[in-house]
Image (tube, helix red, strand yellow):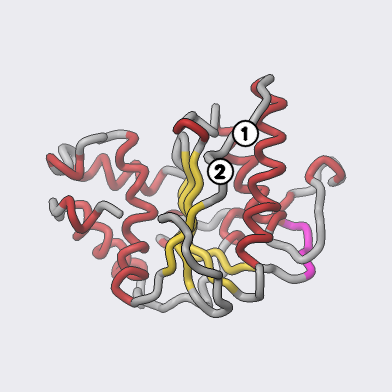
Amino acid sequence: MERQFNFAVGEYYHVYTRGVDKRVIFLDDDDRRYFQKLLYLANNSERIVLRDLPRGVSVYQIPRKDTIVDIGKYTCMPNHVHLLLHEKQEHGISTFMSKLLTPYAMYFNKKAQRQGALFDGRFRAKHAHDDAYLHYLYAYIPLNIIKLIEPKWKDMGIKNLAGAKRFLESYPFSSYQDYIGVERKEAVLLNREPFPDYFQKVDDFKSFIHDWLTYLDEDVISP
């Protein structure tokens, strides 16, 4: 996913960043929740500093002037993050990622009492230039978390399909819950309107995910 292109307005991109030396970038759920809040705050044409917000105010209720990218999907893994982004204005993705990763690294280093780079260089991106790859990302990004409970599922299949589905539906640090109709404050992170409407109903999406969970082609599921 090394970037060999400039982002083009109106196009879709699979964006990925991981910890330096593949180190863990989330120590606990508080870190993951903080990152989700930054996903909201960084997607703004104006600068908002989390520590300056009044106590008792939900981050997700703070009005934003203009968003600079559209987020279609995301997943937080222990040592990396996947995003599906739509470039809605020139330099939007680059600006957004800087506003997202820099304050998170500062927060993490202070909490962990460490110094130095947290992320492995610049974020990576792949242009979702055709419909087949874009459609595939609707499975690949959320299904990353299955490795947390069944590390070899792509080689050996799912041992507990019902358990895997329950884990997907209960994991709050991705956009999966938003695609299956769970009402939650983090739903405002997404703007699905600019993305293709592949699924007319929630059941269509669940069926799509079921097909991927039961399909054992390593060449297809791997990036």
**Nearest the eye: 96 or 78:** 96
For marks 1 and 2, give the CA distance: 8 Å
Looking at the picture, which amino acid does disc 1 mark? Ala
Q: Is residue 124 left or right of residue 167?
A: right
Residue 206's disc number: none
Q: Element under label 1? A: loop
Question: Residue 63 in magenta?
Answer: yes
Asked if 27 appears above or below 161 in the picture, the reply is above
Q: Which residue is mark 1?
A: 117
Q: Which residue is mark 2?
A: 121
* Res 152 → quadrant: top left
Name the residue rendered at 60%, 41% in the picture: 33
Looking at the picture, which amino acid does disc 2 mark? Gly
Label 1 close to label 2 by CB (< 8 Å): yes
**Magenta region's main secondary structure?**
loop
Q: Residues within 10 Å of mark 2 (few under 14, many from 20)?
A: few
Name the residue rendered at 41%, 55% in the picture: 1
Q: Position of residue 120 (x, y in %)?
A: 52, 39
Q: Residues within 10 Å of mark 1 (few under 14, many from 20)?
A: few
Q: Is residue 59 left or right of residue 121?
A: right
Q: Element under label 2? A: loop
Q: Is residue 128 visible?
A: yes
Q: Position of residue 153 (x, y in %)?
A: 20, 41
Name the residue rendered at 32%, 44% in the picture: 166
Asked if 196 appears above or below 20 in the picture, the reply is below
